[in-house]
Image: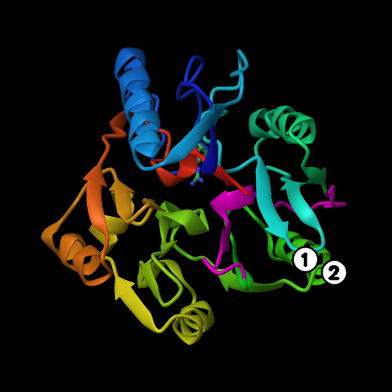
Amino acid sequence: MLRVLLCPPNYFDVVDQKNPYMSRESPVDRVKARTQWETLCSVLQQNGCDVEAIDPVDGLEDMVFAANQVFAGEKSGYGKFVVPSRMVYPSRQREVPFYADWCRAHDYRVIELDFGTDYLEGHGDLLWHPDGSRIYGGYGFRSTRGGIEKFSAAMSEMGISVVPLHLVDPYCYHLDTCLCPLNNDAALIFPGAYSAEALASVHKFWKRVHLLTADEAHRFMGNGIVVNGSYITPHLTSQLETILHEEGLTPVIVETSEFEKAGGSCFCMKTFLQ
Ligand code: ARG
């Protein structure tokens, strides 16, 4: 069974502007947020996932975005491991030890990196190729190039390579908003989010690259969760439906309007545990 870690939205709120989606003018509807979060959990369960929840912490309003605090992986000969992040925003830095402790208590090897002045934001910017052969690392807004390099050095000790990808669209400030691996051969991307060099790199590593429009990407349609033949997405266009059909995936819509106000959607709200 696939295990997935989420954090209930008890203290979720928009209190500052960490990304261009966030604004004090669109307050969060707490009741709606709870319903949307619970729906996401049940859809994951219906798709064969074992949902684990970490305790939310008062004052950590973005802790619900469970994709960012650690990067989780497994490598034969090394076992299950996590790399705790160094988040850019101080309020988010405080989330990290709670996740690292949770993982330690659940038998993960915790690989602490010495980031110096660099940043690394977990699965927000680090995505596995589905076969585990490499990791894509986005940088430019949150994770820094140096953070990706330090992470890459640690992964190379396990024989895993990391492909750095320079991000240039502030609305796609995390890689998980503009790259979504669909299977070993196909990925969904928003090309406008990448530097020319990064875009060339993406094309090199995927046989089929499906393009999202800016509107689709900025409405988090590239922030879906691929699980059990489903694509869990907050919105759907006929274009996206056609792509998913070509790749043998069935769209499942889960509304995340409240979390989008904080600049996140389905993918941002969970970490797959290995
Ligand atoms: N408000 C959060 C932030 O700006 C949203 C994080 C979204 N997470 C993600 N994996 N893209 O840090």
Location of residue 168 in the rendering, given as x and y in whole percent from the top left corner: 48, 65
- Which of the numbered marks, if any, corresponds to residue 157? 2
Q: Is residue 16 above or below residue 212?
A: above
Q: Amino acid at mark 1?
A: Met
Location of residue 123 in the rendering, given as x and y in whole percent from the top left corner: 58, 51
* CB-based contact (under 8 Å), mark 1 and mark 2: yes
User: In this orientation, which residue lies closer to the viewer: 146 or 231?
Assistant: 231
- Is residue 121 rendered magenta in the image? yes
Start-end of magenta stretch: 111-132
Query: Does the rendering let one see residue 137?
Result: yes
The secondary structure type at the circle numbered 2 is loop
Residue 170 image-quadrant placement: bottom left
Determine whether, in the image, residue 31 is placed left or right of residue 137.
Answer: left
* Residue that label 1 marks: 155
Determine whether, in the image, residue 114 is placed left or right of residue 24.
Answer: right
Determine whether, in the image, residue 140 is placed left or right of residue 153.
Answer: left
Location of residue 7 in the rendering, given as x and y in whole percent from the top left corner: 53, 26
Residue 31 image-quadrant placement: top left
Q: Is mark 1 within 8 Å of ligand 1?
A: no
